[in-house]
Amino acid sequence: MTPDEFRTHGHALIDWITDYLEGIERYPVGSQVQPGEIRAMLPEHPPATAESFDAVMADMDRVIMPGITHWQHPEFFAYFPGNTGYAAILGDLAASGLGVQGMSWVTSPACTEVETLMMDWMQELLGLPEKFRSTSATGGGVIQGSASEATLASVLAARWRVTGGRINTIGDTTNLVAYATAQAHSSIEKGLRVAGIGTSQIRVVPHDGSFAMRVDELERMVAEDRARGLQPFWVCSSRGTTSSMAFDPTADIAHVARANGMWLHVDAAMSGIGALAPEMRWINDGVELADSYCTNPHKWMGVNFDCDLFYTSDRAALLGALSILPEYLRSQAAEAGAVIDYRDWQIPLGRRFRSLKLWFTIRTGGVTDAIDMMRRHVGLTQELASWVAADPRFEVIAPHPLNLLCVRLKEGDLETDAMIEKANASGRALFTRTVLDGAVACRVSIGGRTTERRHVEQAWALLQELA
């Protein structure tokens, strides 16, 4: 592709993306294809000669679009928000065009320094503790790809700290124990398994009626493990779980963690970004006591995936766990302590210029846009809850302080499952199911950038129709 062709096709692709996003309601929300159908529409072998860009774009419409689940659709109420914005798309395009490899400061100073600044900007905008700023004596932040990576990084840092760094040479994790509730994200178990903590060493702490961790049970389980000669080393406090939007009592959990030498990780991936709005700053309650924290602008802020904000107040433990320095990566600036090499703050060596999409978004008014959007979503969720309460066939089975409502048919699990399956098959909306204390529920996650009241009304009418 020549530079002139790139200009021409680039303009056409921007137009195509804009037309897609502005006309997205013409598509069914969920893909209607069957397994293997997309591959069967494409050649089994690569082309022998170059094809035209027009042919590629034609197949985008013919082949790719039928197999897309439309996360940007205003009636996408499944999983969690994954909204994007035009400024973020352009920031991602700029990062792709620059094509830098930001593994260390010396490989592209702007990549590192803009990221550090964006982490500090977001710390300020979210009202997070000062100890997470890059200018603090012991803390700082980094953009990870996802909350799963952030969780694993926190586990590795905790493992390094509790073993005094000996894990780097000995590798025995058989006496380490971690704690979380059944409502905590599945990435926690995966991260602990990757870190060498067996599933048998993960304690599922009981939750209360609001699906929040019971601290008395945490204390009891920690005491029992210590009495058995085991070492409690890591605990997760969720601030807005994916399944039920549960909020653990972080401050109380922190007291147990500190008394027992445990690392406290706060997972606010789902909803922590809501703290951008001053009236939602309660989401941060207890975070000042955490050793690490994460939240995702790529969920509810209009910054496209991937962009997880991971902060720690103990960067020495994080670097101790993850820093590797072969000769070809040495630099005078890093050895003098004048710069950050973010490769030592994450699992992979390589890293993209992810902070550009955050920088573009913030500078073009994205924070104000996000706050307005989130307020609209919270208001719609509360309004939907009132509609559900007025229909005797339905019930709400979890607290709903923000933008997730868990509803079910009183008739039972089979009926609720059938309703969800029929709704999703209709293409008119998309929901996901969950199971809360043995009861099947339909999760209605209201988080789309373009979702308005009429879309929620239509989704509720669909559920009522299928009940």
Image (tube, rainbow, N blue to C red):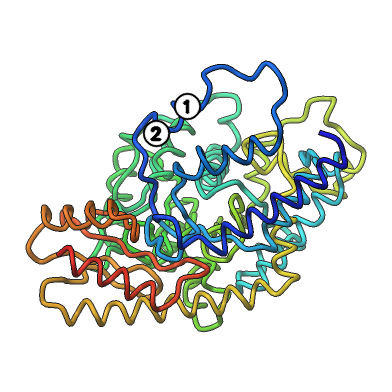
Q: Which mark is residue 148?
A: none
**Amino acid type, residue under disc 1 in the picture:** Asp
Q: Is residue 260 left or right of residue 395?
A: right
**Amino acid type, residue under disc 2 in the picture:** Asn
Residue under label 2: 175
Q: Is residue 330 left or right of residue 36?
A: right
Assess disc 2: are there few (<14), some (14-19) or many (≥20) residues with their C-alpha within 10 Å of its C-alpha. Answer: some
Residue located at (38% from left, 64% from top): 445
Give residue 371's quadrant in the image. bottom right
Residue under label 1: 172
Label 2: element kind: loop
Instruction: Report the Cα–Cα distance between label 2 and label 1.
Output: 8 Å
Residue located at (67% from left, 44% from top): 345
Seen as rendered, the residue at the extreme left is 411
The front one of 97 and 385 is 97
Label 1: element kind: loop
Q: Is residue 415 above or below residue 230?
A: below
Q: Position of residue 400 (x, y in %)?
A: 32, 73
Q: Position of residue 309 (x, y in %)?
A: 61, 56
The front one of 144 and 197 is 144
Give residue 200's quadrant in the image. top left
Q: Quadrant of the N terminus?
A: top right
Residue 102 can be seen in this image: yes
Q: Quadrant of the C terminus?
A: bottom left
Q: Position of residue 71 (x, y in %)?
A: 47, 55
Assess disc 1: are there few (<14), some (14-19) or many (≥20) residues with their C-alpha within 10 Å of its C-alpha. Answer: few
Residue located at (18% from left, 56% from top): 440
Residue 268 can be seen in this image: no
Q: Position of residue 174 (x, y in %)?
A: 40, 29
C-beta proximity under 8 Å, tags 2 and 1: yes
